[in-house]
Structures are given as C-alpha cells and as structure tokens.
Image (cartoon, rainbow, N blue to C red):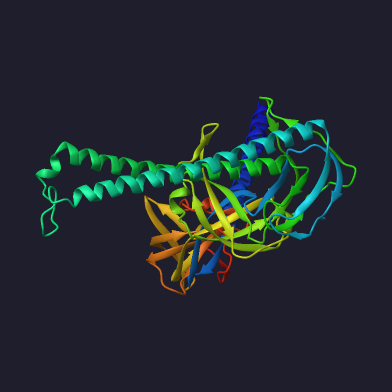
C-alpha cells in the first residue's frame, strides 16, 4: 500500500515538472513573438520618400503621329514610247530644266504606230483650232453689220427723242425688237466662238502632250534633279497597255525639286480636334537616328477615313528647310506641338493622385508628409501644370518605397497620370527616409 502511494506521488511530481517546462516554453515563445513583431514593426515603419521640387517652367503639350515622306517634291518621267534606247542625255544627280532631252529611242513597230496616231490627233486638233479662229472672223463681221443696222434704227427720230433719250413706247414695236434681237444674237455667237477657240487650244495642248508621251525623244516634264534613271544605250523598252488595251505609260526616272519634303501622317479621332494648321512639329526618321527636323502642319483632312472600324484623319506636314537626304516613302515619327504655356508651376505627373474624387499631392515639409488638394491645368507625358494648391519650391512626393521590399510603392490613392510612369525628368529632388517611432 505504501509503495502504491509513493508511485502516485512520483507521477504527480513528474507531471508538475512537465507542465512547468511547457509553461516556460510558452512564455519564451510569447516573448520571442513580441520582440520580432516590435522589430518588424519598426522596420516596416521606416519609409523612404522619393521627392521632386515644384518648379516654374514652360509646359509643352504635344501629340504623336506616324506616317511617311510623301512624293510632293518630285515627279516621274514617263513614256509610252517603245523600242531600243539609242542615246541617254543625262545621268543621276544631274540638274535638268523642263523640256530638256532625257533619252532617245529607235521605235519598234508598236512605238511607230502609237507615235503616228498621236501625231495625227495633234494635227487634227490644230486644224480644229484654226477652223474655230476662221469662224470667229465671220461672226465678227456679222456682229458689226447687225450692230450698224441697230444703231441706225435706234437713233432714228421714230425711236429716239431729240435730246438723245429713247422713246420707250416706240421701242416695243416689232420692227425695233427684231433688229435689236439680231444684234444681240450675233454678239452672243461671237462671244461663244471665243470659248470654242479656248477649248480648241486646250485640245491642241493635250494632244501635243500625248504626242510627246509617244515620241521617241523623251523630255523632262519639270526642272529638278534626275534620280532613279536606269536607262543605258541598248536598253529595250517594251510597249505597255492597260486592261482596256489603251497605251499605258511606264516610268523611266524621277525628277526631284528643291522644295522641302512633305510628310503625311494619320491622326487619331481623339487627337484631331487638338491639331490646327500652322502647329509646329518636330520630326524624326528611323533612317537618321539622333537627328530632329522641324516643320509645321499645312493641311488636315477633317473628313477622315475608316479602315477595319478605326477612323483616322490624314494631315500633311511641311518641313521648314530642304533636306536632300530625306527620301520619299521613308517612315516618320512626328510630335505635333498643340500648346505651349510659359511661367507655370510644374511637377512630375506621377505625383498627382486621386483620393475620394479629388486631385491631391503629398507635400514634404519639415520631415513630415501632408496631403494637399490641388487644381491642375494641362499636362504632357511627364509634367503636369498646377494652377492652385502648390507654390514654387514645394517638395512633392513622387513615390514611397518600403526598404524591406525595395521597388514597391505604398500607395494612398491612384494617379490619373499613372500611365506615364511618374517620370521626373528635369525636376530637382531626392530620396528622404523617415524612421517610424
């Protein structure tokens, strides 16, 4: 019996000792957790602020557009002639004047036929012009005759008072009206014949130009610099025809003038209302990296065009100066300056946030951060104009970084300009770390 009692006492003591160990372990765990949470709490409350200074400056607002260099300062040298090239009078890079010879051919049968037909059309147009001029003489004679008859009648005492005023009641008689109408009709026919002569002259010019197209001698259509000429003596030009079987022209060279290049770009429908004729433009080309050209908008097609459900509006940009290195159809990126505002307060766009529907900016003063409500004006990709709420020199918070997770931002709101990445180019500022207490 005594043994059993001693066993029970021993078990109780052992149990008590184990519970003490467990209690001590729990106390140690609680203390460790408190220390860790206190340490981590201090670290997470240590915040680094990236800042920038509100500065006065010039805000340039622009939109971007892409396109190509157009061929507005060049034209093609075309011909409908066919045969063997016997003479080339120019070379690439050579300056020519309108009407200068480019090349000469020995025409083949097709070439001779086309040339002969064009010559016949030209001669027919000349004959029509001469006939129209001859008819004018006859009409002029009739005009003068009828005018003399009218004047003799009109100045008769039957139809005119002694003081030279007309007798209006007598001039309503059939005899007077008939003579007057004859004169007016002959005058109208004479004037109409002058229009017929002008039309005949136009036909002569058109037939002459067509004859030049089929001529075995190829002429320069404008003055400028030859480019893209590949003809040489012995080259064969084959007659070209369109789908209807009529003669078609083929290009043998281009002529480029000294006019500055023009650029065609497409504007999105949200951008076209902002762009005006004469807006200044900066232009870059992939072919000339690091080089920027200037120009202005000279035309905007406000009708637009729809392709695959997307509406775009063509615009034309003229460069300010000639740039001979720029070639037709090169790809272009243009920045069209829509607004310039001087002497305004500017901050990085990423510093502006929206909190409860209001635009706000966090401001650093005496090592503390305060949120202020602001009013904004215009903005571009990197800068925003502040019209109220900030002063020049104020230090604004552009980003908040947690040292335990560098690169993550502690956001208290959303930036309406967040798509611009909060760029701070050109603003003074730095990083300020505040240790939590």
Count of numbered tags: 0
Q: Nearer the viewer, residue 269 or 119?
A: 119
Relative to 422, is 193 above or below? above
Of 289 and 54, the residue lying toward us: 289
Instruction: From the top left corner, tell me how far across and down residue 270 is, in percent.
Output: 46, 46
Rendered location of residue 397, percent (x, y): 50, 63
Toward the viewer: 312 or 340?
A: 312
Which residue is pictured at 14% across the width and 58% down the height? Answer: 164
The residue under the point 30% across, 48% down is 147
Question: Where, by quadrant of the figure, is residue 183 drawn?
Answer: top left
Quadrant (top left/top right/bottom left/bottom right) for the N terminus: top right
Q: Position of residue 171 (x, y in %)?
A: 14, 44
Res 35 visible: no
Viewer-closest of 49 and 156: 156
In this picture, is 426 found above or below 259? Answer: below
**Residue that extends furthest to the right in the rendered view of this protein:** 234
Residue drawn at point x = 78 percent, y = 31 percent: 110
Res. 64 in view: yes
């Amino acid at each position: 019996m005594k043994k059993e009692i001693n066993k029970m006492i021993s078990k109780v003591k052992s149990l008590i000792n184990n519970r003490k160990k467990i209690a001590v372990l729990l106390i140690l765990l609680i203390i460790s957790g408190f220390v860790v949470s206190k340490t981590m709490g201090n670290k997470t409350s240590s915040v680094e602020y990236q800042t920038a200074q509100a500065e006065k400056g010039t805000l340039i607002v622009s939109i971007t557009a892409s396109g190509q260099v157009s061929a507005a300062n060049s034209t093609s040298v075309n011909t409908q002639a066919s045969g063997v090239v016997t003479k080339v009078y120019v070379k690439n890079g050579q300056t020519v004047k309108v009407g200068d010879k480019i090349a000469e051919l020995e025409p083949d049968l097709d070439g001779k036929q086309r040339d002969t037909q064009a010559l016949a059309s030209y001669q027919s147009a000349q004959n029509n012009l001469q006939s129209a001029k001859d008819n004018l003489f006859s009409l002029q004679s009739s005009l003068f005759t009828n005018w003399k008859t009218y004047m003799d009648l009109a100045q008769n005492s039957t139809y005119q008072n002694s003081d030279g005023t007309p007798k209006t009641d007598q001039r309503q008689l059939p005899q007077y009206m008939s003579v007057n109408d004859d004169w007016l009709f002959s005058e109208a026919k004479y004037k109409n014949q002058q229009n017929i002569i002008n039309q005949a002259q136009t036909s002569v010019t058109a037939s002459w130009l067509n004859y030049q197209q089929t001529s075995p001698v190829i002429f320069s259509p404008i003055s400028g610099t030859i480019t893209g000429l590949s003809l040489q003596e012995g080259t064969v030009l084959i007659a070209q025809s369109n789908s209807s079987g009529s003669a078609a022209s083929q290009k043998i060279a281009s002529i480029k003038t000294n006019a500055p290049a023009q650029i065609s770009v497409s504007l999105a429908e949200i951008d076209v209302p902002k762009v005006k004729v004469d807006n200044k433009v900066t232009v870059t080309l992939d072919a000339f990296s690091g080089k920027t050209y200037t120009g202005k908008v000279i035309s905007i097609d406000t009708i637009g065009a729809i392709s695959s459900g997307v509406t775009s509006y063509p615009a034309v940009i003229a460069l300010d100066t000639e740039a001979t290195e720029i070639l037709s159809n090169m790809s272009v990126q243009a920045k069209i300056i829509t607004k310039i505002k001087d002497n305004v307060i500017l901050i990085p766009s990423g510093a502006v946030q929206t909190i409860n529907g209001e635009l706000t900016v966090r401001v650093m003063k005496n090592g503390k951060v305060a949120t202020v409500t602001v009013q904004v004006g215009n903005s571009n990709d990197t800068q925003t104009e502040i019209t109220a709420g900030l002063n020049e020199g104020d230090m604004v918070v552009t980003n908040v970084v947690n040292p335990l997770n560098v690169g993550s931002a502690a956001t208290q709101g959303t930036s309406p300009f967040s798509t611009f990445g909060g760029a701070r180019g050109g603003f003074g500022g730095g990083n300020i770390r505040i240790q939590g207490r």
